[in-house]
């Protein structure tokens, strides 16, 4: 999935912020994308933190940065599709669960997620 042209276009639209190690390796990412069907709504996405720097506040910092950039672009409602392990992070950051569901991960795999929002 990550090698196709559609994925490259998706990344280009995701307003990604990257955290790099001194050697240039990507160690964390966070982005957002406007939700075309809902004016004024942005979705937080592409959150990744390398396990070597996990539990140090990096994800919280990058999510807040992505939120601020989305708000600066005119969005007042922020949504996220959170994997189960990330739900506590988003709750801590002021999100609330709207519902639960699944995300197609390819290869017949569906990951359980919470659909969350913050206004």
Image (cartoon, rainbow, N blue to C red):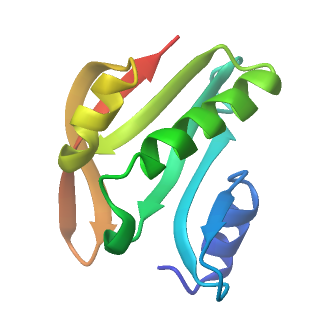
**Picture coordinates of residue 80 (x, y %)?**
43, 35
Count numbered badges in the picture.
Answer: 0
Residue depicted at x 59% and y 84%: 25
Compared with 117, 89 (above or below) is: below
**Picture coordinates of residue 17 (x, y %)?**
68, 56
Residue situated in front as seen by the camera: 4 or 44: 44
**Picture coordinates of residue 86 (x, y %)?**
27, 44
Splitting the image into 4 quarters, where does residue 74 fall?
top right
| Left or right position of 8 against 105 | right
Residue depicted at x 62% and y 64%: 19
Residue depicted at x 20% and y 31%: 100
Compared with 99, 82 (above or below) is: below
The residue furthest right is 73
Splitting the image into 4 quarters, where does residue 23 fall?
bottom right
Residue depicted at x 71% and y 20%: 75
Compared with 117, 29 (above or below) is: below
| Left or right position of 25 against 59 | right
**Picture coordinates of residue 77 (x, y %)?**
58, 16
């Amino acid at each position: 999935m990550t090698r196709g042209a559609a994925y490259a276009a998706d990344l280009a639209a995701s307003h990604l912020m990257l955290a790099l190690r001194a050697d240039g390796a990507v160690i964390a990412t966070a982005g957002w994308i406007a939700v075309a069907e809902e004016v004024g709504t942005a979705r937080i996405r592409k959150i990744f933190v390398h396990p070597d720097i996990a539990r140090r506040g990096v994800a919280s910092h990058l999510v807040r940065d992505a939120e601020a950039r989305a708000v600066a672009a005119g969005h007042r409602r922020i949504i996220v599709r959170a994997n189960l392990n990330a739900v506590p992070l988003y709750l801590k950051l002021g999100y609330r669960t709207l519902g639960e569901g699944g995300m197609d991960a390819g290869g017949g795999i569906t990951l359980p997620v919470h659909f969350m929002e913050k206004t």
